[in-house]
């Protein structure tokens, strides 16, 4: 029996499969499409995701593939200078087209030994006490101990589970594409600037050599949103809004997306879990969806691996939903708020002006950016030190730096006292005795996803916490 089947080979599914495989779990990805998509949805990787890439040894590659832009302007497009003191080494947004990010994650997963089976569509599932039977479109069945639906916003897995997906339906659709434009660049820039005064969903961003990423509101809702628009449809919308289609031709790809906001009622039903867009969808404001999915995978990967390999304490796998669903709720809330703030209605514009003034307060500006970049995420681990439940930024140590020590994906006791011990858990936790001028606590226990599980200097206190996250110690 396969350990884990991942339905969907998008960024969430492939990241998750890599997280499982690096811990010795046998993970198979079933992807319905024959080829990776060329459609560029996400363009932005935020600080927390860059941090995760660093913790997996992918930092040099993502930096080489992306362009760094300042973080200002991410909340509802309100431009403000970057606030002081953002608690991360990566104070920029990294612009990388989604297909490039996906390629990088696929390469990593494949190197780790993950099999990604293409043209394999999941159409059915049933589960019992021992495992899950997964049915594919060609009628074949596979058996696994767990199944994770990373199959996007229209998730088949979620529907087969009967998990509700309440929220608001799409009210507006936007057409998107990569095309060649023949009009002079200055003319395009001037017209776009003019139209955007009253229509923020209109745009044409030059990608070089006459190719542009263009977007425009659709005339209405498509009968079948899965069917991409035609170039004529996009040109028609351009002419309607701007009086010109800039001589658009030779589309590389065309797509449409809606502004629905929905959250799955549950992330787990027995042996089947949901992650990424399969669990939450929202408009792309602030560029958060792909980041959120990758971070879901990072949270779920070590927990599911612990369950499969047998050391997971009671409740560990359920903590995936307890921790990640509130994070998605917050993202849905902030994208809802941003959607209101870009409306051109007079009331919304007044609120926008007010928010813009509030963002002149450093703390407000920083708070909003901590949300968008996800560095402000704090899981509820109960009362305790202010670091508890938060992720720790990378810090320099006497020998090296923190994130380099996290590449094995295990727990980590960073011990500045040299007096502590994780004997009994040494197969799950690395114990590093070192000192950092940037760390004001004697010792910190990090979970494999980098979130702080304990702070202190008392061995008995530490031993009281270890089983909660790392299961029983071995003598
Ligand atoms: C215009 C736009 C701009 C965006 N910009 C950003 C941004 O800047 N930053 C950001 O973080 N996010 C952004 N997003 C959101 C981001 O694109 C998504 O959140 C992200 O793709 C979700 O990844 P996923 O792996 O969860 O789902 P998906 O990328 O949807 O992948 C799901 C995969 O599952 C496969 N699949 C579906 N059904 C089945 C089945 N039954 N069996 C097998 N396989 C199946 C699909 O073919 C697909 O490959 C943007 C979205 C849009 C539309």
Image (tube, rainbow, N blue to C red):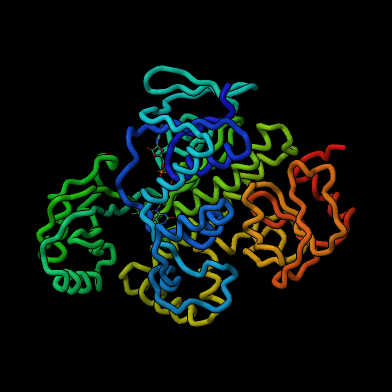
The quadrant the N terminus occupies is: top right
In percent of width and height, residue 305 lies at 64, 37
The quadrant the C terminus occupies is: top right
Q: Looking at the image, can residue 228 be seen?
A: yes
Rendered residue at 65%/41% (across/down): 303
Q: Looking at the image, can residue 328 be seen?
A: no
The image quadrant that residue 186 belongs to is bottom left
Q: Residue furthest front?
A: 399
Question: In the picture provided, is 88 more to the left or to the right than 35?
Answer: right
Rendered residue at 59%/40% (across/down): 22
Residue toward you, 392 or 338: 392
State whether residue 150 is above or below residue 87.
above
In percent of width and height, residue 192 lies at 20, 69
The image quadrant that residue 63 belongs to is bottom left
Rendered residue at 44%/49% (across/down): 281
State whether residue 7 is above or below residue 384.
above
Question: In the picture provided, is 117 more to the left or to the right than 404?
Answer: left
Q: Residue furthest right?
A: 460
State whether residue 435 is above or below residue 249.
below
Question: In the picture provided, is 320 more to the left or to the right than 466?
Answer: left
State whether residue 219 is above or below residue 155.
below
The image quadrant that residue 354 belongs to is bottom left
Rendered residue at 40%/17% (across/down): 139
Residue toward you, 362 or 442: 442
In percent of width and height, residue 8 lies at 44, 36
In percent of width and height, residue 178 lies at 23, 54
């Amino acid at each position: 029996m396969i350990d884990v089947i991942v339905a969907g080979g998008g960024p969430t599914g492939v990241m998750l499969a890599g997280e499982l495989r690096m811990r010795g779990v046998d993970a198979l990805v079933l992807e319905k499409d024959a080829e990776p998509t060329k459609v560029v949805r996400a363009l932005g990787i935020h600080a927390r995701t860059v941090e995760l890439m660093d913790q997996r040894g992918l930092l040099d590659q993502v930096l080489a593939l992306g362009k760094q832009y300042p973080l200002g302007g991410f909340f509802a497009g309100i431009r403000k200078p970057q606030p002081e003191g953002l608690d991360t080494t990566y104070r920029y947004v990294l612009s990388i087209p989604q297909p490039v990010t996906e390629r990088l994650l696929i390469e990593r997963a494949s190197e780790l030994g993950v099999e990604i089976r293409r043209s394999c569509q999941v159409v059915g599932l049933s589960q019992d006490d021992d495992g899950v039977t997964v049915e594919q479109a060609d009628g074949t069945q596979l058996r696994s101990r767990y199944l994770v639906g990373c199959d996007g916003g229209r998730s088949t897995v979620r529907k087969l589970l009967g998990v509700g997906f309440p929220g608001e339906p799409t009210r507006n659709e936007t057409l998107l594409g990569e095309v060649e434009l023949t009009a002079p660049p200055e003319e395009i820039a001037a017209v776009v600037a003019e139209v955007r005064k009253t229509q923020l969903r209109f745009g044409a961003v030059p990608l070089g050599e006459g190719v542009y990423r263009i977007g425009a509101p659709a005339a209405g809702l498509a009968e079948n949103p899965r069917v991409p628009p035609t170039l004529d449809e996009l040109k028609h919308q351009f002419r309607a809004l701007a009086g010109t289609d800039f001589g658009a031709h030779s589309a590389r790809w065309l797509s449409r997306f809606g502004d629905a906001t929905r959250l799955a009622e549950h992330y787990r039903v027995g042996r089947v879990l949901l992650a990424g867009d399969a669990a939450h969808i929202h408009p792309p404001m602030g560029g958060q969806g792909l980041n959120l999915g990758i971070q879901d995978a990072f949270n779920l990967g070590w927990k599911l691996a612990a369950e499969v390999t047998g050391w997971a304490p009671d409740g560990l796998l359920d903590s995936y939903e307890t921790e990640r669903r509130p994070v998605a709720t917050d993202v849905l809330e902030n994208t809802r708020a941003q959607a209101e703030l870009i409306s051109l209605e007079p009331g919304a514009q007044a609120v926008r002006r007010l928010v813009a003034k509030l963002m002149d307060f450093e703390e407000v500006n920083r708070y909003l950016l901590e949300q968008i970049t996800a560095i402000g995420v704090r899981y509820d681990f109960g009362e305790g030190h202010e670091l508890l439940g938060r992720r720790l930024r990378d810090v320099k140590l006497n020998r090296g730096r923190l994130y380099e020590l996290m590449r094995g994906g295990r727990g980590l006791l960073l011990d500045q006292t040299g007096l502590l011990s994780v004997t009994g858990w040494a197969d799950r936790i690395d114990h590093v005795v070192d000192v950092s001028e940037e760390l004001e606590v004697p010792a910190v226990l990090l979970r494999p996803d980098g979130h702080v599980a304990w702070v202190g200097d008392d061995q008995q206190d530490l031993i009281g916490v270890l089983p909660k996250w790392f299961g029983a110690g071995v003598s």
